[in-house]
Amino acid sequence: MVATTPAFDPASTVRTRYWHRLDDGRVQCDVCPRACRMHDGQRGLCFVRACQDGEIVLTTYGRSSGFCIDPIEKKPLNHFLPGTPVLSFGTAGCNLACKFCQNWDISKSRETDTLADAASPASLAKAAVRLGCRSIAFTYNDPVIFYEYAVDVAQACRAWGVKSVAVTAGYMCPEPRAEFYRHMDAANVDLKAFSETFYRNITGSHLQPVLDTLMYLKHETRVWFEITTLLIPGENDSDAEIDAMTTWIRESLGADVPLHFTAFHPDWKMRDKPRTPHATLTRARAIGLRNGLHYVYTGNVHDAAGGSTYCRECGALLIGRDWYVLSDWNLTADGECRQCGTRCHGVFEPAAGTWGARRQRVQLSPPAPGRPAAA
């Protein structure tokens, strides 16, 4: 076996639960379907889970690439506490290998210097309350890979009345998935395409585990979730694929699961692709609505109509949105249409939040000597 390296900072390294030993001396991580198999001192593809002393450890517990207060609509979640601020953070690494990654500086990072801030679960929960945030989001990279930290933060937040939001690709094994979502209040799941070929060739993963996560969320939890699909020209934006995906969502998850079609911009290893035309998003939204979905949105473009929420029964404007600013609020205190009384599916408070489009960076720990504070 390879000797344990000193590369893992003991201050941020914790033992984990979901793994098992193999006959050849390696240890297999069982958190996600990638099933990385490691000798001592080796890291998994996600970079943050590693083998130390014959077991899998998380090497970035309590560490973050930075904290920021965002509008909840930026996650994107349009039906979960609209207009409210959410304390957002991520770590480093990712368990997928998406060639189009739009947060590649964080998710593809192999440098722990990326993790410029730190906070314990309890201090994060208290900070969310102090900063007036109704929720906290594990985002920028996937919380599946920093599972233990995310669960501990969610538990601490629940004790303070702060909701927890997972922004995830949904690529997770069944047993840890069940425990993970027991602590989550909401999720946005990135359904990257509706093609196994796309998942295999462009993300280095597989489609079915993501569909399994969506089915699990719908039929076995009370977690509020929404779905996002980034449309990439020539890769996952055909009428046939969008028709198949939206039909599956309606038949398998129901018509009331919100779906966001968002615009791609050239990044990471797909800089040769053009930006997604606005017309593509409008067309995708029309297909979803035609297939019976009640709440279909466009994102990453300025589209007030495509970003707003309408009554599924009478068509009245319920929540008007201009980018991340709420321009109209026509829901009752019980989340019903003021015009016809039909319930709008989601998690709503009696009044809309007023956070708007602001994005505010916050430093929760003193910067390390010689390291500047986060911008």
Image (cartoon, rainbow, N blue to C red):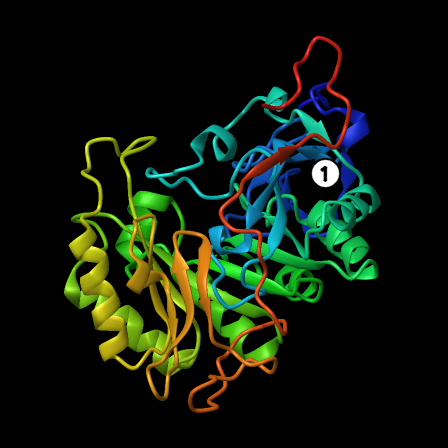
Q: Residue furthest top?
A: 370
Which one is nearer the viewer's eye here, 31 or 101? 101
> Which residue is denoted by mark 1 in the rendering?
57
Quarter of the picture holding the C terminus: top right
Residue 285 place in picture, x, y as percent: 26, 66
Q: Is residue 73 visible?
A: yes
Mark 1: secondary structure: strand
Q: Is residue 169 visible?
A: no
Residue 176 place in picture, x, y as percent: 65, 59
Residue 253 place in picture, x, y as percent: 43, 78
At x 60%, y 57%, the residue is 84
Residue 304 place in picture, x, y as percent: 32, 59
Q: Taking 278 as reference, is 170 left or right?
A: right
Which one is nearer the viewer's eye here, 245 or 205? 245
> Within 10 Å of the Cα at label 1, are there few (<14), some (14-19), or many (20+) other Cα atoms?
many
Quarter of the picture holding the N terminus: top right
Q: Taking 69 as reference, is 129 left or right?
A: right
**Total label count?**
1
At x 77%, y 55%, the residue is 157
Kind of residue at disc 1: Val
Q: Is residue 160 above or below residue 342?
A: above
At x 62%, y 51%, the residue is 86
Which one is nearer the viewer's eye here, 65 or 339? 339
In terms of image quadrants, where is residue 294?
Answer: bottom left
Q: Is residue 195 above or below residue 221?
A: above
In terms of image quadrants, where is residue 101?
Answer: top left
